Image (cartoon, helix red, strand yellow):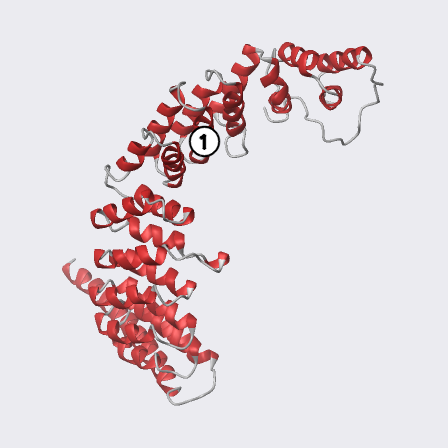
Amino acid sequence: MRKATCVVLLGLCTVGALIIAKRYVHEHRLMEILQSHKGSTTADAIVENAASELGKTRSHRAVAPLIEALQDSDPTVRRNAAESLGAIRDRRAVNPLISALQDPAIEVRTSAALALGDIKDPRAVIPLAAALSVGQNKLTISAARALYAIGDPRCVPALIKALSKPSVDPDNDPSSAIAIALGGMGAPAVEPLQRAVRSNESEPGFRCFAALALGRMKDRHALEPLIEDLRSQEESIRRQAISNLGCTDSSDAIPPLAALLKSNGSDVALRKMAVETLGQLAGVFPSAADALSATALNDPDLTIRSEAISKLTGWWLINSPQTNDTLQAVVRDGNPELVSTFYDIIIKKGYPGSEGSLIKALNTKGSSLMAEDFLNSGNSTLERAASDWALRNGFHVMPKIAGGTSPQWGSQH
């Protein structure tokens, strides 16, 4: 039995040695291909692939030839070499990659920045922070992501300065990447971000992304000044606070906004802003939808109630429990103004027993378009009511419209 065990173990060791030997030969061959291109001025797909494949080996033996490849004449080879060095994560590559931040090719610069983020060496913090101010959005995004990965707060001033600069290229706007990086810096970034968010001199876009950074913090005190601003005597400050809280993308913003809605003494315009902001957050946080649902029929102002229902019936919430509960409450309440505003969604939902409220709304606030939709809804009770309304109001009843756009009863049930 012992001999058999030894034979099995010997076999496994032999297989392991063969695998290691094969891997070594593969690495050696890739390095030979890479070094064979040294001094060449032409692009070579085989060499470009070798520079990329060496990263997959995770072999520290490949670091030296990859560092040399950062000087290759082919920018694709240089980019692939930078990416491979990031994958291997050897600190010997830090200074060469820092030098590559000055490469003439933008794809090499961005790959070098991301590779430095993969290695996470603090020597890269100052050069990456400097790269934020170069004015190249792709490089700024990569540098911000790298700084986030390293997590060294020395870069906070540079990140905030970069965030304050408006982007001229909307397709490569670095603001979100910078805000995420700032959000990852923790306590050292809180106070400067709070100052930025509350400054009347800051651009709205800058304030919004600074608020996003605060919202991503683990620090529960980060949003306190914004919440405090909701109680300001200055209407402009309260408005700005509501807007900023919407930008935070944080569930911590929901309770103070919901409290503002419950305070019926607050300005209608401010409550409407709070509804809009909760609508932004409701796609991510069910508690924001709960706050909208609680407001939908309880606010004394009809426009606020209508706005809350409108937000709940957006495509991102149309099938949520809060939306269904609210629409059924609208039907039970029977307010003709609200029912006539949202009749098409109520028809699509096909709530049993909702016909009475729909017909009341038609007879009170109806229009020819509403009657036409009732006629083509597929609900016989609504069709008869629409025919009666048309006769009373001097409209001619037309046959059903085949393939029309009228809401169909129960199509979103």
**In this orientation, does residue 60 appear?**
no
The residue most toward the bottom is 39
Residue 385: name its quadrant. top right
Other residues around mark 1 within 10 Å, as few (<14) / some (14–19) / many (≥20) = many
Q: Position of residue 278 (x, y in %)?
A: 43, 31
Position of the N terminus by quadrant: bottom left
The residue most toward the left is 2
Q: Position of residue 259 (x, y in %)?
A: 35, 23
Residue at x 30%, y 43% (from the top left corner): 214
Position of the C terminus by quadrant: top right
Query: Exactly how many numbered labels are in the figure?
Result: 1
Residue at x 18%, y 60% (from the top left corner): 5
Residue at x 51%, y 29% (from the top left corner): 311
**In this orientation, does residue 373 appear?**
yes
Please tell me whether residue 264 is drawn above or below residue 220 in the rendered image: above
Residue 133: name its quadrant. bottom left
Q: Position of residue 168 (x, y in %)?
A: 48, 60
Task: Report which residue position mark 1 lands on.
Answer: 273
The residue most toward the front is 234
**Front-most of residues 98 and 118:** 98
Label 1 sits on a secondary structure element that is helix
Please tell me whether residue 397 is drawn above or below residue 77 in the rendered image: above
Going by the numbered disc 1, the residue's amino acid type is Met
**Front-most of residues 41 and 156:** 156
Q: Position of residue 152 (x, y in %)?
A: 22, 57
Q: Is residue 277 left or right of residue 198?
A: right
